[in-house]
Amino acid sequence: MNRTGQISLYESTTRRVVDRPDMYFVYIIQSISSKRYYTGSTEDIENRLVEHNRGENKSTRYGVPWKIVHQEVFENRSEAIQKEKQIKSRGVSRYLQDIGKLAYG
């Protein structure tokens, strides 16, 4: 846990995160077909990805299939929403560059 009380967890898409009811995720997914990004928050990241890939979200319906490219874990919903807003205001590509998950250029 860092000084703000945030738990940072950078997981690859192949590693499973143990579900806990007191954890909230901020995630960035990327469309495999269109290469665009979507940022969201949830308590159940695995189920949320399934919903995106089923086309159940209006914003991601036309980018199926999606893959998780980044996720962070928070102890409460308000911290997760704050981080989601921060990422969206910065811009997903810039945010991924800032944390070293996207090559510059």
Image: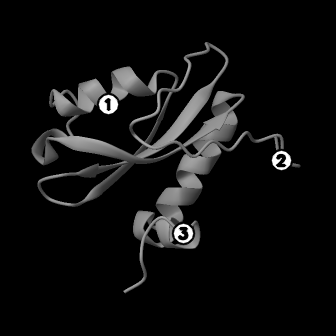
Q: Position of residue 94 (x, y in %)?
A: 47, 72
Q: How many marks?
A: 3
What is the three-letter code of the residue carrying label 2? Answer: Asn
Residue that protrudes farthest toward the front in the picture: 14
Q: Nearer the viewer, residue 11 or 85?
A: 11
Instruction: Quadrant for residue 99, please give it.
Output: bottom right
Q: Residue at x 51, y 64 (%)?
A: 89
Determine whether label 2 and label 1 are within 8 Å by CB.
no
Is residue 33 depicted above or below 80 in this figure?
below
Q: Residue at x 52, y 23 (%)?
A: 43
Residue that protrudes farthest toward the right in the picture: 3
Q: Position of residue 5 (x, y in %)?
A: 83, 40
Is residue 59 at all visible to an observer of this figure?
A: no
Sequence-first disc among 1 and 3: 1
Q: Which residue is mark 2?
A: 2
Number of other residues with Cα within 10 Å of mark 2, as a class: few under 14, some 14 to 19, many 20 or more: few
Q: Which residue is mark 1?
A: 49
What is the three-letter code of the residue carrying label 1? Answer: Leu
Could you say whether the residue bearing mark 1 is in a helix, strand or loop?
Answer: helix
Sequence-first disc among 2 and 1: 2
Mark 3 vs mark 2, foreground winner is 3
Q: Residue at x 61, y 15 (%)?
A: 20
